[in-house]
Amino acid sequence: MLYLIAKLIHIFSVLIYGGFLFTDNLILMRMQKTLSTQKYAEVRSYFKEFTKVLVPKALILVVLSGIYLFYVNFGEISADGLSNFQVLLILKAFLASWLGLRGVLQVFFNIQPLIFKSHKLPFILVIFIVILSQVMWHV
């Protein structure tokens, strides 16, 4: 039962974080081309105001539930070494940990990333992580 709850929390939190990145990268960037600079800044500030309440909390839930799910799903290492599933799970966990650390440092400690200041790379990584999460069960 705990596993199911953690998985549901993880999925819904990923939807919130991924939805934020989707909106920022695909919708707001398109608005920038059609709105005046002042109007775009106003829309962007509204978006930031509404998302800064929910998205950081969702990010924390993604990281915490992801750690638990990693622990439960990783399993034991066989004498033959890591399975394909375990390799993909480690890759997924590494990428997700980087996103989580970057987000926590940026939101809670106001430490801006040195590189990749836009949300394009996190958006691409979220898509890649979601694809990995589906593929790893079938290799």
Image (cartoon, rainbow, N blue to C red):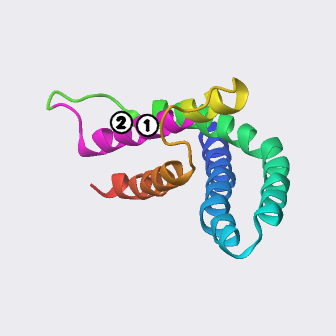
In the rendering, which numbered label is found on residue 109? Answer: none
SS class, disc 2: helix
Query: For the stretch drawn in magenta, what is the main secondary structure?
Result: helix
Marks 2 and 1: CB-CB under 8 Å? yes
Q: Is residue 125 above or below residue 78?
A: below
At label 2, the amino acid type is Ile
Judge whether residue 68 can be spotted in this image. Answer: no
- Point out residue 33 in the picture as x, y percentages from the top left corner: 65, 72
- Point out residue 107 in the picture as x, y percentages from the top left corner: 70, 33
Judge whether residue 12 can be spotted in this image. Answer: yes
Nearest to the observer: residue 14 or residue 21: 21
Nearest to the observer: residue 109 or residue 73: 109
Nearest to the observer: residue 46 or residue 34: 34
- Point out residue 94 in the picture as x, y percentages from the top left corner: 41, 35
Q: Is residue 3 above or below residue 31?
A: above
Q: Is residue 108 above or below residue 24?
A: above
Q: Is residue 19 magenta?
A: no
**Which residue has dot 1 on it?**
93
Q: How far, Cα to Cα, is label 2 from label 1? A: 5 Å
SS class, disc 1: helix
Residue at 16 percent of width and 27 percent of height: 79
Quarter of the rendering occupied by the N terminus: top right
- Point out residue 97 in the picture as x, y percentages from the top left corner: 49, 33
**Which residue has dot 2 on it?**
90
Q: Is residue 101 left or right of residue 1?
A: left
